[in-house]
Amino acid sequence: MFSNGGAVLMQAGFARLRRFCAIGLSTFAVLGAPLSVAAEPLKVVASFSILGDMVKVIGGENVQVTTLIGPNVDAHSHEPTASDSRVLADANVVVMNGLGFEAWMPRLMRASGFKGHEIVASTGVTPRQLDHDHDHDHGHSHGHDDKADGAASVDPHAWQDLRNGVKYARNIANGLSRVDPVNRAGYQARADIYVTEMEKLHNEIRQSLAAIPAERRKVVTPHDAFGYFGQAYDITFVPVAGLASDAEPSARDIARLIREIKKTKSAALFTEKALSSRVINQIARETGAKVGGTLYADTLDVTDRPAGTYLGMFKWNAGQLIFSLKP
Ligand SMILES: [Zn+2]
């Protein structure tokens, strides 16, 4: 993935030198100085809000981040715009999740003429594979991306485990360091602090959720976004729809889920930010189960809200689950 890093670095460097030159420091003697490269932040494009926050934390003052899919927007239904294309054309780096989450990205990158460096944040995580029998047991339809048929059963929502968040942070820091080695120490130092916070929060969430009796750890959500969270923190998530949030669950799937909830009498219902709560409210009406709150799956809230950052999202989700699931 870094095979063209050298050429890209030179291009990125030259592009910034040209701009530097254009703003007035015009002698060629100045252009050779490393100071001129460090003077302008890297232009980084993040595909969606969670990555945008991570890049801001790790990049600090050395990056200028543009997020294509902003807060409180459903990432699965994103249709690239002309403005996305313009932003990419001008960027030094693009940071994306991978695992098939941004099926639209390769085409957009080609169409925009993007010539920068690509960082795939999920590189090195162990992908969660879905086997279809397991899907059927949970009674939901397969809302897979039609664009990625072969990879359809790989769950892209790897950021929902803080141990994967650590890998994302390292990949972002290493990628930025390769493109902008002058500022390597800063990227690595900020990532170190960030990773320590993630590890601390991971242990805190595990400990708090461990206090909840096993039979109460069952949660119904609109789409299949919390598989990694469930594995990491021992909660069974039962999604109404599949991996992509725009899949409509069938009436038969909903009826089966309602029967299951009535029978087991032990599931908490949660809505998801940026998604319709219609089906969850219907299940609540028909089963008498309460809606425990709203979880953040694929999007952050706006920055000044509790779930406005990646770490804030975890604190919010864990808090909502603990409040609702505790006896
Ligand atoms: Zn999703």
Image (cartoon, helix red, strand yellow):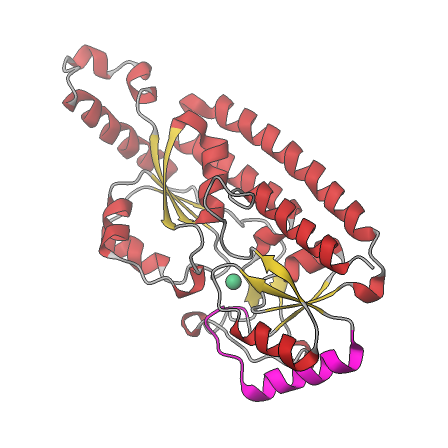
Using the rendered view, name the quadrant where residue 212 is placed. bottom right
Residue occupying image coordinates x 85% and y 60%: 213
Q: Which residues are magenta?
A: 243-265
305 on left or right of 266? left
Residue occupying image coordinates x 51% and y 71%: 152
249 on left or right of 133? left
> Does residue 164 appear in the picture of this structure?
no
Please tell me whether residue 245 is drawn above or below residue 135 in the rendered image.
Answer: above
Spot occupied by residue 30 in the image (x, y as percentages of width and height): 22, 12
Using the rendered view, name the quadrant where residue 38 is placed. top left
Spot occupied by residue 105 in the image (x, y as percentages of width and height): 36, 57
Task: Residue 253: say if magenta.
Answer: yes
Please tell me whether residue 318 is drawn above or below residue 19 in the rendered image.
Answer: below
Q: Main secondary structure of the magenta part?
A: helix
Using the rendered view, name the quadrant where residue 221 is placed. bottom right
**Residue sitting nearer the eye, 321 or 92:** 321
Task: Residue 50: say if magenta.
Answer: no
169 on left or right of 37? right
**Residue sitting nearer the eye, 296 or 14:** 296
Residue occupying image coordinates x 74% and y 81%: 262
Spot occupied by residue 116 in the image (x, y as percentages of width and height): 32, 41
Spot occupied by residue 244 in the image (x, y as percentages of width and height): 49, 69
**Residue sitting nearer the eye, 1 or 58:** 58
> Does residue 188 appear in the picture of this structure?
yes
